[in-house]
Amino acid sequence: MEIIIGLVIGLLVGATVAYFISGGKAKAQDQSHQQEAERLLADARLQAEKELADAKLRAEQTFAEYKDKQEAFKKQKIAESREKFARYKEEFKQEKAEELVELREKREALKEEQASMKEERASFKADLDEILRAKESFQQREEEIQSRKAQLEEEIERTREKQTELDTQHDRFTQELEKIASLSQSEAKQRLLEEVRAKAETDAMSLRRELLVEAKEDAAKDARKVVINTIQRMCAEMTIENTVSVFSLDSDSVKGQIIGREGRNIRAIEAATGAELVVDDTPETIVISSFDPIRREVARLSLKRLVSDGRIHPARIEEVVAKTRKELEDGIKEIGQKTVIELDIHGLPAELIRMVGRMRYRSSYGQNLLKHSVETAHLCAVMAAEMGLNKKQVKLAKRAGLLHDIGKVADEDNELSHALYGMQLAEKLNENPIVVNAIGAHHDEIEMNNIISPIVQACDAISGARPGARREILEGYITRIKELEDIAKKNEGVNSAFAMQAGRELRVLVEADKVSDQHADELSFKISQEIQETMQYPGQIKVMVIRETRSVAYAR
């Protein structure tokens, strides 16, 4: 731009100079012309300087705009680069995190597999040690048998010698007797046979009479046994709904995983839950059997979780059973809270709410205990209202009706009846004295001191006595099963005991460090004898004492 302005100014100056030169050559230049030329020259210079200043200003503005645009473009590119870098960095972090999670899962799987292999190795070692011990015992027994055999051969030889000597003496005595009695051997034999026949006929008549009496007694025993077996069979039919749960499988191939190698998984499940698993030919079905509904539910939920997870081994089984038992306890609390909310009962202690929830998994003579208690509570409220009692007394009647059988869901064994134990428990938890008296007096074990107590007693009888509400055979069966377990648990060294197969088998788990193998044999015999002496039962009961040793170590 400055070059163009310079050219314009040069052209103007040249034209002016040429004009004056041409005027000089013509020799006709006056003063006015000279002044006009000077003025034009001055105007041209001013115009040129003005144009030059404007051009410089525009150039500076253009350069400034170009610089601003360049700076903005630079900032935009930098921002885009930073954004891309941040995005790439976040993607990289996410990929790394996913890889770390996958690596951690693989590491946990390897650790579990390693633990399982260690456990199997320990099991193999234990089996090998047991085989070696059995081999040594067998060798000792064989040596004892050989020694005993030699002794027997010597005794047999001595016996033969004595038999020969006795035969010789018998012949000599016979000859002497013939001389003394003046009878031959055949005559003496005939006389002896006649005497023996007469005595035998007399003894036979007496024996016949005794056998007839014994036969009648045996027939009466057999008749009682038939009746008892029939009752037992009918009891099983009536209790199957309350003692058996059916677990459905998607495929029969899962049964092998549940059973495990040599049955170790199914033994671990039964030992952890106390319920019996029956895996038969029924397709896609496993039967869970136990008289205790809580044990049955723990076994069912644990099986469901193990099958969905796919990892089934003893360590995992114990972990899942413990977790399931904890979740079931939480569910019991929720059931108790829901029940008291539905009955509009307020201010009930947390321990009593938990025990109300436990009623859901107990039965009384075949009747669900929670349903019976809720029904009794409603009946008490209605009866109290019909009798014209005030609202506070109606609420107390409903409260006492719900809690009247709370002693049946005790956490520990107690020598008291359920009514007295429930009364003590309610009193310990600062329950209303009227409710406490109603709980203890609903079976006439203590004296009633208020109007609510007879209402609770009457409504309890109404709920339990209606047709189809209860089955007393089931209650007797459950009592017998509990007595079996209690007999085993009271022995020293017993960790837990579970009655299986409708009470025909008792499995006793003992502590390995307190009970030896020899003591385990003695313990099984002792328990069986105590059951035989103190209980009445049909058929026979198999007592199985299980002693298990575990060695656990962690590689960190």
Image (tube, helix red, strand yellow):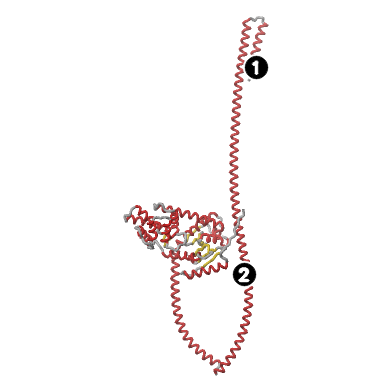
Q: Residue furthest bottom?
A: 182
Residue 78's place in the image compared with 514, above or below, is above
Which residue is under mark 2? 137
Residue depicted at x 45% and y 78%: 215
How far is disc 1 from disc 2 in space, using C-alphas?
Answer: 129 Å
Residue 15 as seen in the image, left or right of residue 444: right
The image's mark for residue 7 is 1
Q: Residue furthest right?
A: 25
Q: Is residue 366 visible?
A: no
Where residue 317 appears, x then y in whole percent?
54, 57
Quarter location, residue 223: bottom left
Residue 238's place in the image compared with 381, above or below, is below
Where residue 190 appears, x then y in whole percent?
52, 91
Query: In front: 413, or 325?
Result: 413
Query: In front: 531, or 276?
Result: 531
Where residue 55 appears, x then y in whole percent?
61, 19
Quarter location, residue 138: bottom right
Query: In front: 524, or 194?
Result: 524
Q: Secondary structure at mark 1?
A: helix
In the rendered view of the protein, which quadrant contains the N terminus?
Answer: top right
- Disc 2 residue crowd, few under 14, some 14–19, many 20+, Cα 10 Å: few
Query: In front: 461, or 201?
Result: 461
Q: Secondary structure at mark 2?
A: helix
Q: Amino acid at mark 2?
A: Ser
Residue depicted at x 61% and y 27%: 67
Q: Earlier in the sequence, mark 1 or mark 2?
A: 1
Residue 16 as seen in the image, left or right of residue 239: right
- Disc 1 residue crowd, few under 14, some 14–19, many 20+, Cα 10 Å: few
